Image (tube, rainbow, N blue to C red):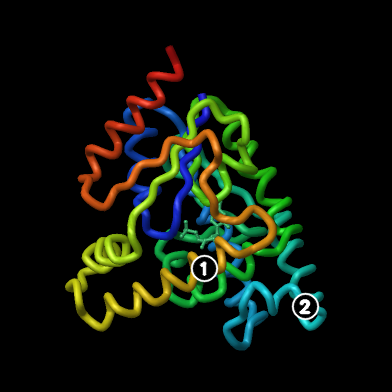
Amino acid sequence: MRIAIDGPASSGKSSVGRRVAEELHFGFLDTGLLYRAITRRAIDLGWFTAPVTAAEVAGAAYEQVRSDLTELARTTDAQGSGLSLTMVVGEVSLADTQLEAADVELYVPAVASIPSVRDALRAVQRNVAARGGSVLVGRDIGTVVLPDAECKIYLDATAEARSARRALQRGFSVGSSEHQSILTSLIARDAEDRARPVAPLVAAADATIIHTDEMALADVVEQVVAEARKVAR
Ligand code: C5P
């Protein structure tokens, strides 16, 4: 069985997906890490000199960058098995901590808006899903990567609830200036992910939508596991 979990930034997809996979003894892939890995490499290689939007990256000035990013995507893989896959771009393995940095979040929607990058990464995602029971989390898993997934979930929550959760996870108080900048960056990233012409963030028509504002993590996990068991019967 393949479980597709989509939703906006910081909607709890990774925490929920990982726990669901653990409970069902499935493999787990956070597909956002693939896009983050390529973005991390491009920043480290000096390909971006200033923040760029999805609209800008589609223009003629970025033709070489688009082509270079696509080459990077073709050498990208999620290596390992089970719950702990490592993102590898070319010969370079990237730790999750390197992928969570604020500069990555600034550039990643533009990188993820490039159709040829998405094509290359789709193959990686489908390979992981083909290994057996799997949970994939992202933006377009139920709509594009695994449109025939047996179980589709869309996790939603207000930007306020999501940013507050993320701030607390990072040790900042709700209402702090750090919380405010997390909220601003999350709203900008969602807007770019929803507006892009290719594989935008949207719930699949056949997804079960779970609003998590008032829910504890354990309750969301329980509901997803119950949905999966329902379709397995
Ligand atoms: O989920 P996460 O916040 O790590 O994703 C980082 C970025 O990667 C998203 O903002 C989005 O631009 C891109 N992404 C995507 N499709 C996916 C997963 C992530 O476009 N399936």
Name which quarter of the figure residue 73 lies in: bottom right
Name which quarter of the figure residue 186 lies in: bottom left
Give the residue pinned by disc 2.
Answer: 59
Q: Nearer the viewer, residue 210 or 72?
A: 210
Eyeballing the image, is 180 above or below 199?
A: below
Category of crowding for the residue at label 2, using alpha-carbon neighbours closer than 10 angstroms: few (below 14), some (14–19), many (at least 20): few
Q: Nearer the viewer, residue 188 or 13?
A: 188
Residue placed farthest to the front in the image? 205
Q: Nearer the viewer, residue 74 or 205?
A: 205
Residue placed farthest to the bottom in the image? 49
Amino acid carrying mark 1 in the image: Ala
Category of crowding for the residue at label 1, using alpha-carbon neighbours closer than 10 angstroms: few (below 14), some (14–19), many (at least 20): some
Amino acid carrying mark 2 in the image: Gly
What residue sits 56% from the left and 74% below the top?
A: 107
Give the residue pinned by disc 1.
Answer: 191
Q: Where does residue 126 sit, x and y in percent of width and height?
A: 64, 38
Q: Where does residue 172 sit, x and y in percent of width and height?
A: 21, 73
